[in-house]
Structure formats: C-alpha cells, structure tokens
C-alpha cells in the first residue's frame, strides 16, 4: 500500500460498491463533484424572482459558517440587503459615483441606483483584516471568506438557484462604508447575489489540473528526472535517493519510511 493509496482508491471502491450508481442515481460524491462542475457566475442582472425563502437564506448562511477559519477568529461577516435596504443601497451607489465623478449625469446616477434593485437575494461580504489579540494574517482571512462565499454559491446552486459575486469601485466609497458601518479594520469584498436564472450564460472553459498544478521538483534527481505534472506526465509518488549515482532515480516511498529509507513508524 502506498502512503496515499487509501485516498486514491477510496472513491473508486465507493463507486463500485455504490448501490445508487447501479440504479442510475448519482452517489453523494458524484453529485457533490457535479455541483462544483455546474456552478457558474450569474450576474445580478440575470437573477430574477423568486429568490430563496427565509429557510433557504438561513441554509446559505449556515453553509458560509462551515468555512475553514484559522484561529477560529471569524474574520468576516455578511450584511443582507432586504427589500427595505434597497433604496438606501441605491442612494449609496449614487453617492459613490459622485465621489468618483462629481460630473456624473442624472442618467448615470439613476443607473447606479438601479443596480441596487437587482437579484432577489443580496448580501455584502465584509472581511476584518486586523484584531488586537491575534496575528492571523490578512491573506488567511481573505481565504476564509473566499471559502465561505464558495460554500454559499454551491449551496445556492444545490437549492436550484443561480448565484454570482459582484464587486466594483463603490465598495471602497465613503458612502458605502458608512451605510454598512464598515470599521477601519474592515474591508467590503463583494456582494453575493442569488435568484432564479432569468437568462443563462454559456458555460466557460475551466482550467485543467495540468494548467494549475505542478509537483515539487526532486532536487536529488535534477538533470535526470524531475517529478512533474505536465503534458504526457502524471503525478508521481514521493521519492527517495538510492545509494549509488547509477541508481539515482525516483522511487516510491514504502509506508513507514522517510526519505532516507529509515522507519518512521511510531514506536508504541
Ligand atoms: C471577489 C470576487 C469579485 C467578483 N466581482 C465580479 C464583478 O464585479 N463582476 C463580475 O461580472 N464578476 C465578478 N466576479 C465573478 C467572476 O467574474 C467569475 O467568477 C469569473 O468570471 C469566472 O466565472 P465562473 O465563476 O462562472 O467560473 C467576482 C469574483 C470574485 C471572486
């Protein structure tokens, strides 16, 4: 058994044994992967009523709450913009435009206001970048929020809705910071919009694993063989350096061995 074989084979075993698959129904694993594959950006202007019910909105935020959170500091929050908040948001968008462009026309200001009326469900995602009692860096806080957002997007799709993220310069305006009571250590990141897809967008080409993954090079094998994921290669297992230069090549580690070949099995 290789160090990772339980991970590699588990899905395959599961698929073969899955009684659901034999009846043409997707297993939980398959439907989760399919959900991720089918998720796509739908901009707020393409999202119509009906939106999620109160129970479904709760499910969206519960999905957000499952996100990883280093130090359990809860470095983000959401502000939902309900029906009553839309006109205030519209005014904030118009003020934000005036902050950027004092010569904005009435038509442009109205267009800015109209953006606040799009999508039945709308919430602003806000990250907190600093705390007095913890040093968790900003990048980890953004990642945590990204995970929360992705959970919400997937949950929205699982519930049969379309969803999308939308940002823009207004997020950095005084008007919007004031409306959402954004503190100095906080940053508005984007809105998440959910609703019924009125007009679907064509699926985009997704990157393949080969475009986004490389394997850490094996320095001992430099010049002869490197471990890599590229055209025509497949990911290899961790390797060890064999004793003679003639035999210098990558070898799979046996379970319980470290890179020098000695046992790493815990003594009990
Ligand atoms: C933080 C963040 C902000 C975004 N803001 C916008 C936006 O303002 N307008 C927009 O059209 N898409 C926005 N997007 C969505 C991307 O455009 C979208 O994810 C990308 O086109 C890939 O499409 P896909 O999500 O269907 O894979 C944002 C995405 C993220 C992560």
Image (cartoon, rainbow, N blue to C red):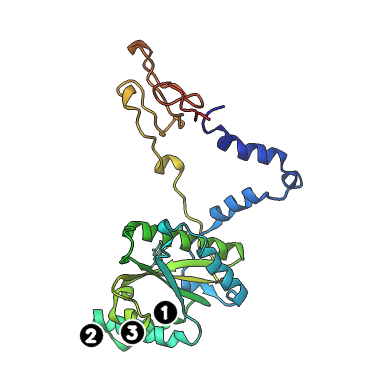
Q: Quadrant of the N terminus?
A: top right
- Where residue 265 sits: x, y (%)? 49, 28
Considering depth in this image, is 228 or 149 the residue closer to the camera? 149
Nearer-the-camera pick, 163 or 240: 240
User: In the image, which is nearer the foreground, mark 2 or mark 1?
Assistant: 1
Give coordinates of residue 147: x percent, y percent. Answer: 46, 58
1 or 3: tag closer to the N-terminus: 3
Q: Position of residue 200 (x, y in %)?
A: 54, 65
Residue at image point 47% right, 62% down: 148
In the rendered image, the vertical position of residue 174 relative to residue 159, given as above or below: below
Dot 1 corresponds to which residue? 115
Q: Which residue is mark 3?
A: 94
In this figure, which residue is indicated by the disc labeled 2? 103
Lower sequence index among marks 2 and 1 = 2
Q: Residue furthest front?
A: 268
State whether residue 29 is above or below residue 124: above
Percent position of residue 236, x then y: 45, 29
Secondary-structure class at tag 1: helix
Residue 99 vs residue 65: left or right? left
Rate crowding at label 3 as few (under 14), some (14 to 19) or many (20 or more) other CA atoms within 10 Å: many
Pair 2/3: label in front = 3
């Amino acid at each position: 058994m290789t160090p990772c074989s339980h991970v590699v084979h588990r899905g395959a075993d599961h698929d073969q044994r899955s009684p659901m698959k034999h009846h043409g129904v997707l297993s939980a694993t398959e439907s989760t992967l399919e959900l991720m594959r089918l998720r796509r950006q739908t901009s707020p202007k393409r999202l119509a009523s009906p939106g999620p019910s109160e129970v479904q909105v709760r499910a969206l935020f519960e999905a957000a709450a499952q996100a990883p959170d280093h130090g359990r500091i809860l470095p983000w929050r959401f502000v939902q913009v309900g029906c009553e908040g839309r006109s205030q948001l519209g005014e904030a968008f118009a003020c934000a435009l005036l902050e950027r462009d004092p010569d904005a026309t009435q038509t442009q200001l109205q267009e800015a206001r109209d953006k606040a009326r799009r999508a039945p469900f709308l919430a602003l995602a806000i990250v907190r970048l600093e705390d007095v009692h913890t040093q968790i860096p900003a990048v980890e806080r953004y990642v945590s929020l990204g995970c929360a957002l992705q959970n919400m997007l997937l949950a929205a799709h699982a519930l049969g809705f379309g969803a999308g993220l939308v940002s823009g310069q207004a997020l950095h305006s005084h008007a919007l910071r004031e409306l959402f009571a954004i503190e100095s250590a906080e940053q508005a990141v984007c809105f998440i919009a959910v609703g019924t897809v009125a007009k679907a967008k064509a699926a985009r080409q997704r990157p393949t694993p080969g475009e986004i993954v490389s394997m850490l090079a094996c320095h001992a094998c430099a010049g002869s063989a490197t471990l890599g994921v590229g055209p025509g290669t497949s990911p290899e297992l961790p390797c060890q350096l064999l004793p003679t230069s003639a035999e210098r090549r990558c070898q799979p580690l046996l379970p319980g061995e470290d890179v020098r070949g000695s046992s790493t099995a815990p003594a009990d």
